Structure formats: structure tokens, C-alpha cells
Image (tube, rainbow, N blue to C red):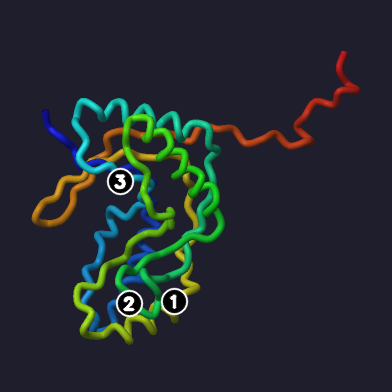
Amino acid sequence: MSKLRTFVAVETPPEIRSRAAALVERLRATSAKVRWSDLATMHWTLSFLGDVPDTEIAAVCRKVAAAAEPFTPFELEVCGCGAFPSAGRPRTLWLGVGEGREPLVYLQAAVERHLAELGFRPEARRFAPHLTLGRVRDSSTGLDELAELVRKHADFSAGSMSVDEVTIFSSELERSGAVHSPLGHAPLAGKPPRSSRDEEDPTQRR
């Protein structure tokens, strides 16, 4: 029985990745040693499942589909450059979210809740939606410069994107980096509530 390193995520469109790349170019202008992310595969991770037997992938896809289906597609504002554990002590560099954070948090919670039915444990840490730009490899040089640039771009905006599906991925580690392959797609199929103007006027019923 083979196993697949599996995670659940929301993909980012090319225009968001392009703007993220522009930010990375600005952050490169320091002597800090950073392992920069492959922006071609940039995504919002909702759940990392680890090594999953290939016989269980179909069940994982069904659970994620059930979690995503009730949600209405929404707009997500990609903005704010920051770092973990803090902007002043950068170790992991990221892009954050503005409008749309709440439905993304609810979506992640629903995915983890449904996957828990298959025995996957939810993350112990509170979900902090972000796009990873890079990770500091050496803390001995350039951190003050990097921290200053992170603070300078705290209000950076990469625009907005539509969230209308969740993707289940496999991740295969190769010498050139991780190769992500989609295993399944889970659309957000909920319908927006009808406005009061769309409701039928009961006085006009016959």
C-alpha cells in the first residue's frame, strides 16, 4: 500500500502570485539569508494531513467536498506583509488577509471538522491564514534590515481573489523542490441569500 503526502488548500490566481513576487523582490534587497518559496505553487493551507494511504484518498475528497459545499464563494483581500514570530524577529515571512478572513477561517474549521471524522487530528495551533513568502535560513546576518523592510511593507496590497473551491493536493518532494498534484476539487456551492427585493410580495399572491 502506497501513501501520499497530502494537504488541503485554496489555490491563488496568477495575478496574486505576480504581486507577491514583486514584494519578494523588494524583500530580497537585504543581506538576510532567506529560503524563498516557490510562488508558482503558492496557496492557503487549510489542513496538512501528512502521509495518507492511497486507499483513503477518495474518502478524504468526499469529506472535503461535504465541508466546502454549503459555503458561498467569497472575495478574499490579500494584504499585509508580516512575519512569524513577529515583524521585529522575522523567521517566516508572509502575506496576510483583510476582508474575507472570517469566511476563510470558517471554511478551514469546517474542513478540519469533517476530516476529524476520518481520524485526522485538527491542528493544535489557532489557524492564522497566510501565504508563506520565505523562511530565514540564518539568523546571524541581515535580520534588522529585513525586519525594517517587513515593517515598511506592512500595508502592502496584492489585490483580491475569489475563493470558489478547495483543492486536495499530493506533495512529492524532489531535488528541485515540492511538486504539488491535485487529487480532487471541492466547489463552494452555497447560494447567496436572496435580498428582500427578490422575495415575492405576499400581497401579490393569487
**Residue 48, numbered circle:** 3
- The earlier-in-sequence mark between 1 and 2 is 2
Distance from disc 1 to disc 2, alpha carbons, whole Å, reads 9 Å
Q: Which residue is mark 1?
A: 153
Give percent across and percent down for residue 106: 51, 45
The answer to which of marks 1 and 3 sits earlier in the sequence is 3
Query: Label 2 crowding class (10 Å Cα cut-off): few <14, some 14-19, many 20+?
Result: many
Dot 3 lies on which element? Answer: strand
Structural crowding at the residue carrying mark 1, measured as other residues with C-alpha within 10 Å and reported as few (<14), some (14–19) or many (≥20): some
Name the residue at 40% across, 59% down.
130
Residue 202 place in picture, x, y as percent: 86, 23
Reading the chain from its start, which is encountered first: label 2 or label 3? 2
Which residue lies under the disc numbered 2? 27
Circles 1 and 3 in contact, beta carbons < 8 Å: no
Give the residue drawn at x 56%, y 57%.
99
Q: Nearer the viewer, mark 2 or mark 3?
A: 3
CB contact under 8 Å: marks 1 and 2: yes
Identity, as a three-letter code, of the amino acid under mark 2: Leu
Report helix, strand or loop for mark 1. loop
Amino acid type shown at disc 3: Phe
Q: Quadrant of residue 55?
A: top left
